[in-house]
Amino acid sequence: MAQSSEDIVRRATAAFNAGRRDEARVLCEQGLIRSPGESMLSHLLAAVLFASGETEAARGYVETSLVQRPDNASARLLAARLARAAGDFDRALSHLDQAIALAPQREAFAEKARTLDQAGLRPQARQAWNAILDAVPGHVEAAARLGRLAWEDGEIALAAKLLERATQTEVPASVWFDLGLVRQDLRDDAGAAIAYRKAIDLKPDHAEATFNLGVVLQEAGDLDEAMRAYTQAYRLRPSSFGQIAMALTSASHGGLWLSGASLRRVLDEE
């Protein structure tokens, strides 16, 4: 007895949720052979492909799904994410506006803020993130992004407040790095060092945080620890040698080397 599309969707969803993406994909593809363009199967296959990084193929399937069910808010949200991943921001925003009209859920508003942000529409992005933070004061992503945008716009005190708010819970290394930048601009070398070290703990290959840690340690007069940070930054990214040399020779607490080769030897030997 042939399985219905609903049965295949249930089996494929269970496989996908269990981490068996290939099985989920095969089930969806087999179902679509029997029922071409079927909305649920097309939507699920798009989600499976997106999770596997096959963005363009996924976009085709979710758009097929929406032809059959244009009022599916979750499919609109997936279509928006796929369009954003492809850099098609106008299409992404169109899908999001329709998703929000159908079902004004928190994730749709957050996705719209991300899309505006990634599209470089800074005033609109800040407005969107602010609306989210007003509605959900504990929204960590909104606080983190607003902090970064405030720093980029020169609003350092506001950036510090927002980023310190964001780092009250678990956040990625990038947020701690942004807090380090802000504290560095505020001449809070000790606070910046704490933030950069946290970023490095979370992402040991974070070359920029490692270099900046060297800078703030040097500014604080701890040249030995600064050299250890610079050495690690150099190992992570040899192209940072020029930045390291400039920092060491131009700061108030620094050193002089007879040549670039002699400095390279010091960094190699540390």
Image (cartoon, rainbow, N blue to C red):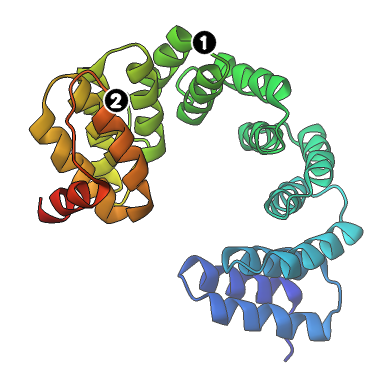
Q: Is residue 270 left or right of residue 109?
A: left
Which amino acid, by three-letter code, is at mark 2? Ser
Tell me the residue at 84%/60% (across/down): 63
Residue 75 in the image: x percent, y percent?
A: 75, 53
Residue that carries the numbered disc 2 in the rendered image: 250
Of residue 240 and residue 124, the one placed in the foreground of this image is: 240
As drawn, 195 above or below 2? above
Residue 79 in the image: x percent, y percent?
A: 75, 53
- Quarter-wise, where is residue 197 in the image? top left
Mark 2: give few (<14), some (14-19) or many (20+) Cα within 10 Å.
Answer: few
Residue that carries the numbered disc 1 in the rendered image: 155
Tell me the residue at 67%/25% (across/down): 125
User: As drawn, which residue projects farthest toward the front?
Assistant: 258
- Quarter-wise, where is residue 179 in the image? top left
As drawn, 54 above or below 220? below
Determine whether the residue tagged by mark 1 lies in a helix, strand or loop: loop
Tell me the residue at 62%/33% (across/down): 110
Residue 134 in the image: x percent, y percent?
A: 57, 14
- For the question of whether residue 204 can be seen, the reply is no
- Quarter-wise, where is residue 54 in the image? bottom right
User: As drawn, which residue projects farthest toward the top?
Assistant: 157
